[in-house]
Image (cartoon, rainbow, N blue to C red):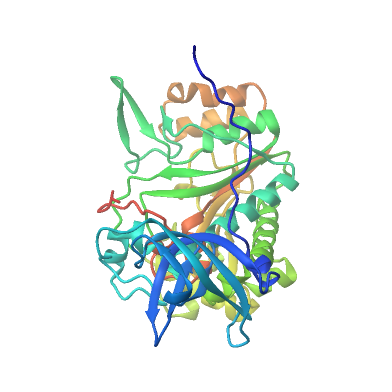
């Protein structure tokens, strides 16, 4: 006879929060975590316990605590402790350990010291040992804040009637084409890693009107710079029935303001730990200044006596200089740059009827770096077909995409925001890899 057991649905008991511990003075608490550091003193030790979200100072007095197993730094333990009032502690209390059960103990020494305020190592070393260096308090705070941004974006977009979608990452055609696309042998057929969910999110506008996705995208760019990755997380949204591409700009400004306010309310400890300067001007006014591309180029050239070598796009240094001018002029850490030249925008970008040499598109710069690209898309079949032919493209390769235009689409547009770039600028990190959990660039596919 087969013996079946019933497993009752029930969440695991989690550690008590800091607030719950503070309310449990002179009571016993049971908690678990890793031994972040042991500092031996005269007659006792400070044991710093690293839980999922905190570092908690505990007092370990050998004669008052029963220890089962080999206790050392990075051991995983389950412990019982008495919550004791301690005015000198930053929390106002501390834990006096009474029992420790070692669940596992490390077999090797840590190759890099992680329990300091900073990790004293090069970025390459930090990334080489990423599974371990992420245990550092500041390192993991970066990605709690990144989590908070995604929660903030998602909460806002759901409130604004956007539907979350999940689009393919193996595709038949790239959204932007060119050489920066990863080729795959897909069961004997040509396929590619998606550069963007562009085609699919446009298709889904015809289904849900407003859609969004937070997911990886892939760029086979051979850039070895502090601002480029070959895989990054894109925050994309697309919306229909717009009157102008500025509707997209207004929606993004509202989304960013809402997410930053969410961070302020829900992630105060991480913001304080990393000394984050939130963009106060956006939070206070809800506004982001805007300037046309050609005007911005001229302004930077004149202000810094710097002739531009690239007429249809910004050089990285120009982005920094423009942001500096905007900050001085308006106090804003952000600026929308609009009406980019048609020559530098993809085939689906809607052109300005009054001046077809420019598009109804924009970039958002944040503290000297482009973090968003967006704009209005072509929604009429005849217009899209004509532009593709004008650009020397073969429309037959985009048959499924063109179906939405044939079948009728409302005026629509959207954007893609690079999550790692945005995180890096918010935290004022020097290198985008510091804001990528396990970065992928032209040199790195491990860990």
Residue 262 in the image: above or below residue 48: above
**Pick the front one: 82 or 342:** 82
Name the spot of residue 167 as percent of width and height, x first: 52, 33
Which residue is rendered at x = 31% and y = 31% of the image?
A: 184
Name the spot of residue 249 as percent of width and height, x first: 66, 55
**Pick the front one: 213 or 224:** 213
Which residue is rendered at x = 51% and y = 69% of the image?
A: 98
Q: Is residue 338 at least partly visible in the picture?
A: no
Farthest residue toward the front? 63
Residue 222 in the image: above or below residue 135: above
Which residue is rendered at x = 58% and y = 83% of the image?
A: 89
Farthest residue toward the top? 1
Which residue is rendered at x = 62% and y = 31% of the image?
A: 204
**Pick the front one: 67 or 364:** 67
Residue 389 in the image: above or below residue 273: above
In the image, 118: left or right of 185?
right
Picture quadrant of residue 411: top right
Q: Is residue 71 at least partly visible in the picture?
A: yes
In the image, 48: left or right of 92?
left
């Amino acid at each position: 006879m087969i013996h079946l057991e019933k497993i009752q649905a029930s969440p695991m008991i989690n550690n008590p929060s800091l607030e719950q511990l503070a309310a449990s003075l002179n009571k016993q608490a049971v908690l678990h975590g890793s031994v972040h550091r042991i500092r031996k003193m005269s007659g006792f030790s400070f044991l710093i316990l690293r839980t999922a979200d905190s570092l908690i100072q505990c007092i370990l007095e050998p004669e008052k605590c029963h220890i089962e197993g080999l206790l050392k730094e990075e051991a995983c333990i389950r412990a019982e402790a008495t919550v004791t009032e301690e005015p000198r502690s930053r929390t106002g209390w501390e834990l006096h350990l009474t029992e420790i059960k070692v669940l596992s103990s490390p077999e090797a020494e840590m190759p890099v010291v992680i329990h300091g305020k900073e990790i004293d190592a090069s970025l390459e070393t930090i990334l080489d040992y990423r599974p371990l260096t992420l245990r550092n308090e500041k390192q993991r705070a970066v990605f709690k804040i990144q989590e908070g941004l995604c929660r903030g974006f998602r909460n806002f977009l759901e409130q604004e009637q956007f539907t979350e979608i999940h689009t393919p990452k193996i595709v038949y055609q790239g959204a932007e084409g060119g050489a920066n696309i990863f080729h795959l042998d897909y069961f004997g057929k040509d396929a590619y890693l998606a550069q963007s969910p562009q085609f699919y999110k446009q298709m889904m506008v015809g289904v849900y009107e407003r859609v969004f996705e937070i997911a990886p995208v892939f760029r086979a760019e051979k850039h070895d710079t502090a601002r480029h990755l070959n895989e990054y997380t894109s925050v994309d949204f697309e919306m229909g029935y717009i009157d102008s591409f500025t509707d997209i700009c207004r929606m993004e400004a509202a989304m960013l303001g809402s997410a930053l306010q969410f961070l302020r309310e829900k992630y105060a400890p991480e913001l304080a730990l990393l000394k984050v300067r939130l963009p106060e001007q956006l939070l206070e006014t809800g506004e982001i200044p805007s300037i046309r591309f050609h005007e911005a180029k001229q302004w930077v050239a004149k202000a810094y006596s710097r002739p531009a070598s690239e007429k249809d796009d910004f050089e990285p240094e120009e982005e920094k200089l423009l942001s500096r001018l905007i900050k001085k002029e308006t106090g804003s850490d952000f600026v929308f740059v609009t009406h980019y030249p048609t020559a530098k925008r993809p085939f689906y970008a809607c052109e300005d009827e009054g001046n077809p040499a420019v598009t109804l598109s924009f970039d958002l710069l944040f503290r000297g770096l482009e973090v968003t690209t967006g704009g209005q898309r072509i929604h009429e079949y005849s217009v899209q077909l004509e532009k593709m032919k004008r650009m020397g493209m073969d429309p037959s390769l985009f048959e499924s995409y063109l179906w939405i235009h044939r079948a009728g689409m409302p005026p629509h547009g959207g954007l893609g925001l690079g999550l790692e770039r945005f995180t890096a600028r918010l935290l004022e990190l020097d290198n985008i890899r510091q804001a990528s959990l396990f970065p992928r660039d032209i040199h790195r596919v491990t860990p």
